[in-house]
Image: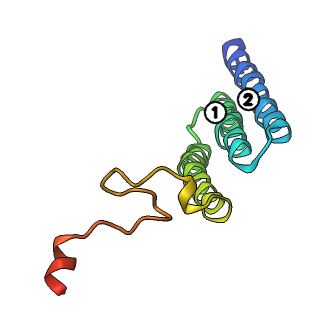
Amino acid sequence: MNIVAEILISLALVVSGIFGFVGSYGLIKLKDSVQRLHAPTKATTLGVGGVLIASMIFFYAKTGQVSIHELLITLFLFLTAPITANFIAKTYLARNVEENDVPECMGEYGWSVYCDPPETSSDSSRG
């Protein structure tokens, strides 16, 4: 393995370690669930992504073939983390925030927990 690959792998691992540390530290230090939600979904996801990129570089430098497994894991991680964070945030909102504590529904869709969904043309034609 050449020196450039080793430097890239080392750099990716150091950067991912820093992101992982910051995400873990934020998970411990932030006050409530909504604040804690951002630490693992942002920083730690980038930390795991950096380790996977380092693994891809390593296996390419070692075998000369691109390993698709790490790319698929990264794609899955980057797709599922925001969705999970959205579900946790909606659950927190439904359990801990009263309807009169949120602003009035001004937009087309409003607050997903408290406002009725907008009528569609198929809803009005049924009635």
- Residue at the (61%, 58%) spot, across then down: 93
Q: Give percent across and percent down for residue 33.
A: 74, 50
Q: Residues within 10 Å of mark 2 (few under 14, many from 20)?
A: many
Q: Whole-percent x and y of residue 121?
A: 16, 72
38 is higher (above) or lower (below) than 117:
above
Which one is closest to the eye, mark 2 or mark 1? 2
| Residue at (67, 32) in percent of width and height | 50
The answer to which quarter of the image holds residue 68 is: top right
Coloration mode? rainbow
Question: Where residue 56 appears, x then y in whole percent?
Answer: 63, 35
Residue type, numbered disc 2: Phe
Q: What is the x, y in percent for residue 88?
A: 64, 58
What residue is pinned by disc 1? 53
Q: Which mark is residue 68?
A: none
Residue at image position (61%, 52%) is 85
* Residue at x 18% of width, y 86% of height: 126
* Marks 2/1: CA–CA distance: 14 Å
**Is the residue under label 1 in contact with that under label 2 (CB below 8 Å)?**
no
Classify 10 Å Cα crowding around label 1: few (below 14), some (14-19), many (20 and above): some
Q: Is residue 18 left or right of residue 90?
A: right
Where 114 sits versus 35, above or below? below
Identify the element where label 1 is drawn: helix
In the picture, measured across the screen, residue 29 lies left or right of residue 19, that is: right
N-terminal label among 2 and 1: 2
Quarter of the image where the N terminus is located: top right
Residue at mark 2: 19
Q: Mark 2: which secondary structure?
A: helix
Badge 1 amino acid: Ile
Comparing 102 with 38, the one in front is 102
Outermost residue on the front side: it is 100
> Seen in the image, is 9 located left or right of residue 124?
right
